[in-house]
Amino acid sequence: MSSPSAVLKGCKVKTVADLIDKTVASLSKMSSSTKPKELEECSKYLDGLKKLLYGIGQVESVTTTLTGEIAKKAESSNFFPLLVEKLEFCEFEAKKDGVQIFTKLVRREVGQEPMARHPTVEYICKEPKILETLVKGYEDSHNQVDALNSGMMLRECVKMEPLAKVIVNDASLFDLFFVYVQKPTFDIAADAFSTFKELLTAHKITCAEFLEKSYDNVFSKYKDLLNSENYVTRRQSLKLLGELLLDRANFTIMTKYISDPENLKIMMNMLRDQSKNIQFEAFHVFKVFVANPNKSKPIMDILLRNQSKLVGFLEKFHESRAEDEQFADEKSYLIKQIKELK
């Protein structure tokens, strides 16, 4: 395995600091009109940094020291903002190297659990432009590779609670996901939804606090996802909604959601959707309304008004799933609950 000095020599620099300075200078030149020689040079520097972070280190302490040295210099040299802004103009392999470098440095820990720190995370918290650039990476539907690269780096950030907080606490940034998850390019929309889901589920307390504080804004826009003309968006959104409502951390949000008769009407309509999968996911949300022992009067009124129709409908609902014992038990329970409503 090559030594750090061999990597630096291959990049024609003397120190790690020199390599980062050269990389920053090279990234700053990247544009849609960059010349092949400049592209090649930038690729060489990013490859060198990746090798220092991943390809070196028979001894763990050396790797840790190198990583720390690279991270500190990168943070003081405008490396991260330039990387996320200019990576789209780099060569294909260089893009992959850039994602790996970013990922390694974001994960960097200093100290032992539970007091371990993530210095690069702390740095990005103070440089919100980095997160903004990554989130808006989903905007270009014509450049799928770059959107997905941004998505990979963004999800690495979202895994870190302080960075997830920055995004959800910025409504102008978070609200963009309601647009991105409905992008016409399937891979970009799916990737954006993965990030969206991570933001709403990865950090239980943070997510619950955010949803409580921003309930009206989030769930008014969430209705648009449930009514989307895009089948995948509707199904994914419905499934995620079920997960959110059934998570104990979201008890307050769940209580508020299932007290709203408009939400119940949406679920009852989706139970009759043409898609069997949509019907099935809607069932898991509908059961929360019925199983609630403290139903609001508007909810009770709707259920009582449709009592006989609901019982008849549910008795025939997804009969092909008879072998699914859990589903059969849940369906029987709901039918019993609805029959006993007074």
Image: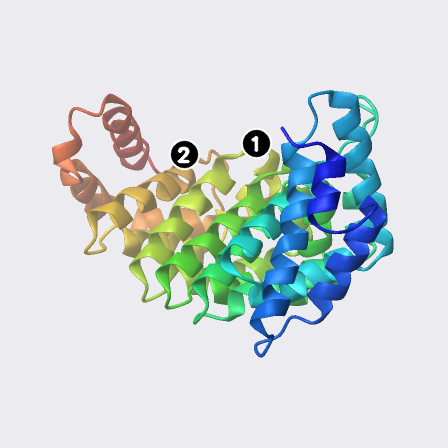
| Residue displayed at 51% across by 62% down | 146
In this orientation, which residue lies closer to the viewer: 211 or 50? 50
Is residue 54 in view from this perspective? yes
| Residue displayed at 66% across by 67% down | 172
Badge 2 element:
helix
The structure's colour scheme is rainbow
| Residue displayed at 46% across by 36% down | 292
In this rendering, the answer to whether 136 lies above or below 62 is: below
Comparing marks 1 and 2, which lies closer to the viewer?
A: 1
In this rendering, the answer to whether 91 lies above or below 252 is: below
The x and y percentages for residue 299 are 42, 49
Query: Picture quarter containing residue 82?
Result: bottom right
- Provide the residue designation for mark 1: 248
Type of residue at label 2? Ala
| Residue 142 left/right relative to 83 | left
| Residue displayed at 19% across by 56% down | 274
Rendered-image quadrant of the C terminus: top left
Is residue 157 in view from this perspective? no
Badge 1 or badge 2: first in the primary sequence? 1
The x and y percentages for residue 177 are 54, 61
In this rendering, the answer to whether 2 lies above or below 19 is: above
The x and y percentages for residue 226 are 39, 59
In this orientation, which residue lies closer to the viewer: 54 or 114? 54
| Residue 221 left/right relative to 272 | right
- Provide the residue designation for mark 2: 291
Rendered-image quadrant of the N terminus: top right
| Residue 283 left/right relative to 223 | left
Badge 1 element:
helix
Q: How many numbered circles are shown?
A: 2
Type of residue at label 1? Arg
